[in-house]
Structure formats: structure tokens, C-alpha cells
Amino acid sequence: MKAAVWHGQKDVRVEDVANPPVPGKGEVTIKVKRCGICGSDLHEYEIGPVGIPIKEPHPMTGRMAPLIMGHEFSGDIFKLGEGVSNLKVGERVVASPLWYCGKCYWCRRGNYNLCRTAAVLGAGADGACAEYINVPAYTVFKLPPQISYDVGALVEPLSIGIRTVKQGRVSPGDTVAIWGAGPIGLFALQAARVAGATRVYVIEKALRRKECAAELGATAVLDPKDGSPVREIYRMTDGIGVDVALECVGEKETGEQTMRLSRRGGRVVYVGVFHEPAQVDFNRIGVFEREISGVFVNNGEFEPAIAYLADGRVKAEPLISQKITIDEINRGLEELSNHKEKNIKILVSFDG
Ligand SMILES: [Zn+2]
Ligand SMILES: [Zn+2]
């Protein structure tokens, strides 16, 4: 089968790897229909390895580079492994990219995403940018008929947007600011609306992403090129700042400035992956009693993500900029890397 394999920085190859994997006990094989290219795939391509093991095999899966990329996908159940009884061959499904041990300190407390040996598809386990993938049955969710394969591939990034809003405890009446209108920022915007936020300000400089934020319900979209978004948001909130600020970029300046957007006693959530450490004035936390939290993958957000897409509370189609074939994976990565003004989500399609 064909797969997009990460060998190193700027070195992703389309290769013929072992034909459809055989599902082990408790596993299923999924025939992949769509696989999205994520910001984290882009990080692995541009500056990796970030999460891909290159020196020692992953403690849970025994896998290391070269590794198949991709973790946002939809497809059909192709084969069932021993002991799997809740799924049927041919069912349309998506799967959470997180594999956990179920036994460690964190798993026993239900913090599965913080599992000591957690493996994430495309990082610690072979990913979904391939014609077939094997995953544990406990990670699989059925897709209702009204969700297309295209939209299904965006369940995973939506789950992160929902978790971001949950970590920020966005509540009815809250004001929210989101730095970055990539897929996660745009889903956090919609999830914040669902949670009852009355005003959601979005900060972004790339044209298509700005347009999309406005289409999807942003109260105002601010471009940092037009002046300080921090000053502008304080002006629009009567000098108070927002109740919850969400950082969906991961750059030195945006990290610090997102904290400043939140009011005294406000909450700040970091989702963006930072390439380098940034300086923080801890008095902004201590003196103003701000609460800070983070997001790693998902823990219980796949079900709401599927429900919101099924009933139309959240829209995913406007985020899909292009569909490519697996042979065009390098063009897709370059396109996302160099042309954010035109692209939000690029999907690899396995059926033309
Ligand atoms: Zn992703
Ligand atoms: Zn664990």
C-alpha cells in the first residue's frame, strides 16, 4: 500500500509499504478515505523531529522514524481483529489519534491524554496518511451518515478546539479572544460560541483565515499589521480585557501577548506548539490571579465534536481549502508552509 513516510526534516517520501496491515487482538484495520495535513505534521516537516522518536523506539509501540505521517482521518472498517465485537466491516468511522496504556497513574485517574507512555498517530505510532491503518478498537468512533468523509477528517482538529474551550472554562456570557485562525483557532471560535461566549475576537494576519473567522461568527477580526491587537481589544472591552484568551499560534510574541489579552482573574489556554522558550513575566500571573492551562490531544472530546458537526452547530467545510492525492503530499506541505493566506486545511484524498 502507498503511504507518506516521514524520514526527516523536509524529507517525506511516498513509499510502497507492507500491504494492508493485519489487525492484532483488539485492533481494527481502517481503509482510509481522507487524511488532513495538520500544523503538527507541518512542524515535523519544517523543523522536525518534534514528537517523532529517532533515537529510541517508542515505549508503547516500539516504532520510530521512518514513520507514516497523519492523524486526522476518516475511512471504512476493513478488517476486525480478534475480540472486536462493537464494530462491523464497512462501517464509516473516525479514530482518536491517542493510544494510552490504561494502567499508569494518569490513566487510572482518567487523564488518558497525559498517559506516561501515550502514543499519538504519526508521532509514536504509524499514522493515517496511507491507504490502510491499524488502530486499537477503543479509539474508533462511528460517523453518522450526514457527516461526509471530508468533514469526518476534521473531527480530530475540532476535538482540540472543543478541549481548548473546555480548558478555558468558557461559560455563557464570556468574552473570548483567540490568537490564530488556523483550523484549531477556527474550531475554538465555533466551540466558544456553542459554549455561550457572547463576543469572540480573533487575531490573524493571513487573508483566507481572516475571512473564514468572520464567516464563522467572530465579533471582530484584528490584523496585527494594522496596529496592536492588545490595545484594540482593551478598547473594545472598556479597558477590561477578555474573560478567556486562547493561544493557537505558538510564537514568542503571541504567547506573551495572549496572556495580556486576558483580564485580571482571567484565564489563558496555550494550544500552539512553541518552537523555542519564550520569556514570561510571572507577575502577570501572580499579581493578577490569571489561570493558565494547556491542551494535549483530546480526552472525551470526540463525541461532542461528532455531535456538533452532525447537527450543524459547527461548520467544517469552509476550512477545507484543497484536496490532493497522496503523490502530491510534498506539494501540499509546501503549499501550507508558504501560502497560509490561501490555505486553511488541505486533505489527502484516497479515492480521487
Ligand atoms: Zn492535528
Ligand atoms: Zn497510561
Image (cartoon, rainbow, N blue to C red):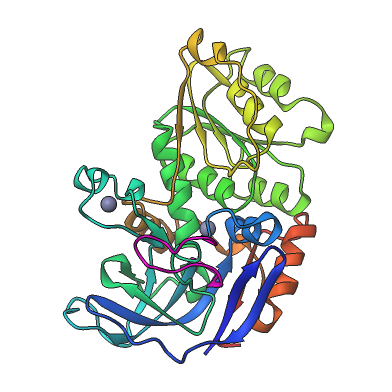
- State whether the magenta stretch is mostly helix, strand or loop: loop
Q: Is residue 202 left or right of residue 88?
A: right
The spot of residue 26 in percent (x, y) is 23, 75
Marks counted in the figure total: 0
Q: Is residue 69 magenta?
A: yes
Whether residue 241 is situated above or below residue 42 in the rendered picture: above
Q: Position of residue 317 (x, y in %)?
A: 57, 64
- Left or right: where 225 falls relative to 230: right
| Picture coordinates of residue 48, whole percent (x, y) | 64, 57
Res. 220 image quadrant: top right
Is 251 included in the stretch rendered in magenta?
no
Q: Give the residue at x 44% y 27%.
A: 173
Q: Position of residue 150 (x, y in %)?
A: 53, 72
Residue 172 in view here: yes
Hey, which quadrant is residue 319 in on the image? bottom right
Left or right: where does residue 29 sit relative to residue 33?
left
Q: Is residue 311 visible?
A: no
Residue projecting furthest to the right:
226
Residue 269's place in the image compared with 327, above or below, is: above
Of residues 327 and 91, the one drawn nearer to the viewer in this rendering: 327
- Taking the spot 48% from the left edge, 18% from the top edge, the residue there is 290
Viewer-closest of 209 and 87: 87
> What range of the chain is rendered magenta?
53-71
Q: Residue at x 66, y 52 (%)?
A: 212
